[in-house]
Image: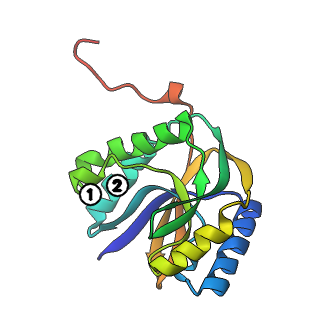
Amino acid sequence: MENLFLVCIIPPISIVEDIDEIRNYISEKFNVHESLKRPAHITLYPPVKLSSFEAESRFFKVLEEASFNIPFTQVLKNFSSFPEHTFFLDVEKNESIMNLGKQIRTALLPLKLQEKRDTNKFNPHLTLAFKDLKSPVFKQITEEFRDKKFKREFHVASFSVYKHQDKRWQPYKEFYFKDPATKPKALSLFG
């Protein structure tokens, strides 16, 4: 058994439809299709392979513990890129999303799912084109979108886990935020 999971935030369907319109436009005009194989999402923890029921159980238990959060508003604003390889919608950095990303990464750290050097990298974004995006096309896309504006905001009260099945990413589990004040405290001999 080996399963591939992705931890992410999925925007509401109305915003996903707007994003998919942009992704489809880019795909058709510039002949780049890789991003269409994934749902429109903000990655909180990169895809991870789990090869046992025990590993999956620990993974989901840790995510459950990481779901004690306060809901927040997230803004997607304009276009940006990681030079030469990824074009995306910029996810406005705010304390809430940065803390959520850090909380999930910190909680999963003891499971040693990633190489240590990769665990603290968190630059939230919503990918529009990558992988099959080559340098000349990258330049054409960034030039076309240089002055275009985009802004959507939405309420975040959960995060999702997607599972790779049948060559597609499928919704698997959603973790709704729970009031941090209700999080059980660790037992202590001296507390």
Residue located beneath label 2 in the image: 59
Nearer the camera: disc 1 or disc 2: 1
Ranked by sequence position, the earlier of labels 1 and 2 is 2
Q: Residue at x 52, y 74 (%)?
A: 138
Q: Dividing the image into 4 quarters, which one contains the N terminus?
A: bottom left
Badge 1 crowding class, 10 Å Cα cut-off, few under 14, some 14 to 19, many 20 or more, is: some
What count of labels does the image hold?
2
The x and y percentages for residue 115 are 22, 56
Which of these two is toward me, 145 or 87?
145
Report the residue marked by disc 1.
114
Eyeballing the image, is 79 above or below 109? below
Q: Residues within 10 Å of mark 2 (few under 14, many from 20)?
A: some
SS type, badge 1: loop
Q: Amino acid at mark 1?
A: Gln
User: Image point 53% across, 34% down: which residue?
Assistant: 95
Which of 165 and 14 lies nearest the eye of the viewer?
Answer: 14
Name the kind of residue labelled 2 in the image: Phe
The residue lying furthest to the right in this view is: 14
Q: Which element carries disc 2, helix, strand or loop?
A: helix
Residue 60 quadrant: bottom left
Residue 133 in view, yes or no: no
Question: Residue 137: horizontal and vertical position, in percent?
Answer: 54, 80
What x and y, as percent, mark residue 104? 41, 45
